[in-house]
Amino acid sequence: MSSIQITNVSKKFGDFTAVSNLSLDIREGEFVALLGPSGCGKTTTMNMIAGLEDVTHGSILFDGQDLSGVKIQDRNIGFVFQNYAIFTHLTVYKNLAYGLEVKKVGKSEIEQRVRAMADRMSITHRLDQPASSLSVNEMQKLAIGRSAIVEPRIFLLDEPLSNLDAGFRAYMRAELKVLQHEFGQTMIYVTHDQIEAMSLADKIAIINEGRLMQYGAPLDIYNNPSNRFVANFIGSPRMNLIDGEVREESGALKLMVHGGAEIPLTGQIRSEFSSDSKVHVGSFGIRPQDIYFGSRRADDDIEMHGVVEVLERVGPKRLAYLQVLETMFIAIDDQDQLRVGDAVPFYLPPAKSLAFDMESGRRLGGPNR
């Protein structure tokens, strides 16, 4: 396994900049997810790490060594792709053995390792069958097993689970994490699915339009998004982000929302919006689970009034869509007490709320509380 140092890396295709000034420090044995919307530059970043694409500017080092002059096949890097990239004309056994045969591993060791990996991936009963006969789920197991069996120093996975059904994706997420712990490999996982990234990764690099938005542990990013893009991208259900004009009237600070709604800014959230006097258009953020109903719990909790427009069942809880004039808030009704059409008060705790500058998207008041 290896550490990877990506320093000020950019990649251009003609006049188009796919990746801009990206820096990441990936420690030995870490599982890092490159997360972002389609076309954001995450696969291009992975391809530069693999050596499939040349770096336009900057450097990528493996254990402090520049491998730009080393052939791809000599870098000891494992790949798993969305489209499997297995040899469908060969048997499952030959697919698993292929990388070991290229490395000239002895036959008895190949036999031992192939059967151990097949057992690990629950495809032992398929070893003598052609890979073309496998189901989609089994093909992905084979693709992962074929790469893992050679124990590469770095394991690169490009959206490997996106073609699988939801139940099997959850199973394979757990399998990947177990495999990483067993082999201790450095893994880089490309995905647009924030649930995959949050459940698998030790660290997440969130990328948008070729630029790094934030890099850190999943829970740190969830609790302390550094900008509005990250706050909107991480979390399910997504954070409420309400945009409006920051206005002070008679000593009171308010967010005046399009359509007439007003959010009085009190306590800590007032301090955050007040931390930069140049901010006139801001965004108020709060996660659905932090909105509550019933009696006010703290004097500075912000009271709002809305109408329940929709109730959506999500497992044991329901999402409540609350209409305040032309503005919609999403909250969690975990007691099943609300009914569509109810006019209800609800509360926004300032200590659980976030403030953003709408023009730049940056977090106000600092990333840490």
Image (cartoon, helix red, strand yellow):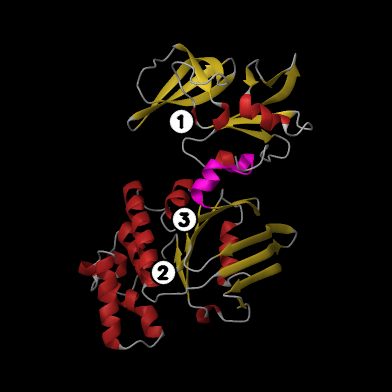
- 220 falls in the magenta region: yes
SS at circle 3:
loop
* Outermost right residue: 278
Numbered tag placed on residue 203 in the rendering: none
Up-down relation of residue 159 to residue 107 (above or below): above
Q: Give the range drawn in magenta.
A: 217-230
Numbered tag placed on residue 184 in the rendering: 2
- 182 falls in the magenta region: no
First in sequence: mark 3 or mark 2?
A: 2
- Marks 3/1: CA–CA distance: 23 Å
Give amino acid for label 1.
Gln
- Residue sitting at 55 percent across and 18 percent down? 299
Q: Where is residue 317 in the image (x, y as percent from the top left)?
A: 36, 29
Instruction: Locate the C terminus and report the quarter of the image it occupies.
Output: top right
- Residue sitting at 48 percent across and 78 percent down? 76
Q: Position of residue 324 (x, y in %)?
A: 56, 16
Residues marked 3 and 2 touching at CB (< 8 Å): no
- Marks 2/1: CA–CA distance: 36 Å
